[in-house]
Amino acid sequence: MIELYANAVVSGLLLGGFYAAVTLGIAIAFGMLDVVNIAHPAFVILGSYVAYICNARFGLDPILVGLLVLPLFYYLGQAIYQISYLSFERKGSDSLRGLAFFFGLLFVTEVLLILVFGVDYRYVEAWYIGPTLRLGPIDLPLRMLVPCVLSLVLFALLQLFLSRTFTGRAIAAVSQDPTALRLLAINPVRIKRIGFGLSIATAALAGAFLIIIQPVEPSVGREYIGRIFAICVLGGMGSLPGTLIGALLLGVVESLTTTYFGPSWSPAVGFGLLLATLAFRPAGLLGR
């Protein structure tokens, strides 16, 4: 019984590390930039398919592919934000129109992937996908451990960037007081464009992690829409440490629920945890 519990907790922490990587872009876009990018999971899946193509055709490691395409997705994110800004934000249009834009982007991306790749599941090959590291009674599947460790490294690097650099602090502050940024001769639109580019770049890397953990097909990203926004709110809007804690907590709760009650209960318990947090601490775990 103790071994079962310990393995469930460790499995939940590894799962939470992956959830953190997927949620990181939303924590930046939604929590810091006030951009409700509902299409975020589409870019995660797009990153998965880029990793799949390069792995299947050229034998490249999926994580290496995720790192190599970071600049490409960064500039893609900048372009998408510029389109959104010119079409909606600059004109002061209803925010629901911007939300509809990202919904449309989500479904257009999914349909294009279906047209090109079909609905078959795709997977990658790498040396760390099959083996399991055993520490006494604890099993550590490398396909979960490697993405989790890299997710923690990614969080640490971004936290340093956001807290120690001028541009990073501007990204964290742009949605709170854009007027103050203008007084410092900083263009808030440029800062939001940089921040949104970072959010899409991290989504692509999370996509490389996803296809390591499980096979993917174009619509699998829908499974994560609710989770990533729940983790973002649970951890506290705009708080990367809070997002990480919320992701790990949700991963452990889901893993324990799956182990003892079955997988069908895990989403309900996870969102129940979110509702309890909002009831007793509306700002989230580490929210301002």
Image (cartoon, rainbow, N blue to C red):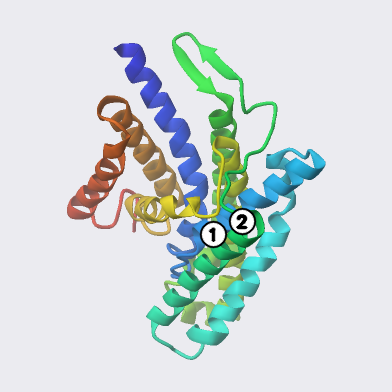
Q: Does residue 145 lie above or below 20 as drawn?
A: above
Label 1 element class:
helix
Could you tell me the amino acid type at mark 1? Ala
Q: Locate residue 177: give its quadrant.
A: bottom left
Left or right relative to 11: residue 54: right
Element type at mark 2: helix
Disc 2, disc 1: CB below 8 Å? yes
- Amino acid identity at mark 2: Leu
Residue 213 numbered tag: none
Residue drawn at (60%, 54%), measured in percent from left and top?
A: 118
Is 185 on the left or on the right of 238, as rendered?
right
Q: Is residue 28 above or below residue 274?
A: below
Percent of width and height locating residue 202: 59, 53
Instruction: Tell me the residue at 32%/19% (across/down).
Output: 5
Image x and y of residue 9, in percent: 37, 25
Q: Which residue is mark 2?
A: 46
Q: At which x and y percent is residue 31?
A: 42, 62
Query: Is residue 174 visible to us here?
Result: no
Alpha carbons under labels 2 and 1: distance apart: 6 Å
CA neighbours of label 2 inside 10 A, class few (<14), some (14 to 19), many (20+): many
Depth check, front residue: 102 or 220? 220
- CA neighbours of label 1 inside 10 A, class few (<14), some (14 to 19), many (20+): many
Give the quarter of the figure containing the C terminus: bottom left
Residue that mark 1 sits on = 42
